[in-house]
Image (spheres, helix red, strand yellow):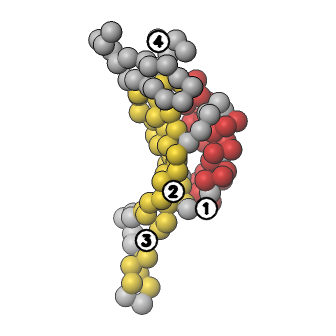
Amino acid sequence: MDVNEKFYALFIIVNAGHTDFVTDLLREHGSFGATIINARGEGIKREVFMGITLDTEKEIILSVVKTETARSFMTAVKTNSEWKNRLHGICFAMPVEAVTGLGTTIIPPVGVK
């Protein structure tokens, strides 16, 4: 693994129950794995049923990937109609300064030797 390689943390938030679709798409574009976190969503409009506020169950998929994978995946998301219709998803990427873990070497942050 090259010290100059750039990585991004992809944060993908979708309706609960659709993580298989997302993780399959991630693998197709070069990701080696992901972490799935259960969450709840709250938007501008909240649904109330018999005095009980209904929160939308969400799942957050987190994957640290190379720059090319992040770009490829986000392009695929942008053109996929399921993303808006069923998944009600959002995806954003944040740069990662250092990576260490299974199958990787330590990639030091800028300025660290």
At label 2, counting other C-alpha atoms closer than 10 Å, the crowd grade (few under 14, some 14-19, many 20 or more) is many
Disc 3 designates what residue? 55
Q: Determine contact: label 1, label 2, CB under 8 Å.
A: yes
At label 4, counting other C-alpha atoms closer than 10 Å, the crowd grade (few under 14, some 14-19, many 20 or more) is few
Disc 2 designates what residue? 59
Single out the mark in the foreground, 1 or 3.
1
Q: Position of residue 23 (x, y in %)?
A: 63, 45
| Secondary structure under the numbered disc 1 in the rendered image | loop
At label 3, counting other C-alpha atoms closer than 10 Å, the crowd grade (few under 14, some 14-19, many 20 or more) is some
Quarter of the image for residue 75 reads top right
| Residue 85 visible (yes or no) | no
Query: Foreground: 86 or 16?
Result: 16
Residue type highlighted by circle 2: Glu
Give the side of residue 7 with respect to residue 19, left or right.
left
Query: Foreground: 90 or 60?
Result: 60
Q: CA distance from mark 3 to mark 4?
A: 43 Å
Disc 1 designates what residue? 17
Give the side of residue 75 with respect to residue 40, left or right.
right
Residue type highlighted by circle 1: Gly
Q: Position of residue 16 (x, y in %)?
A: 56, 62
Residue at screen point 43% across, 63% down: 40
Q: Quadrant of the C terminus?
A: top left
Q: Position of residue 31 (x, y in %)?
A: 61, 33
Q: CA distance from mark 2 to mark 3?
A: 13 Å
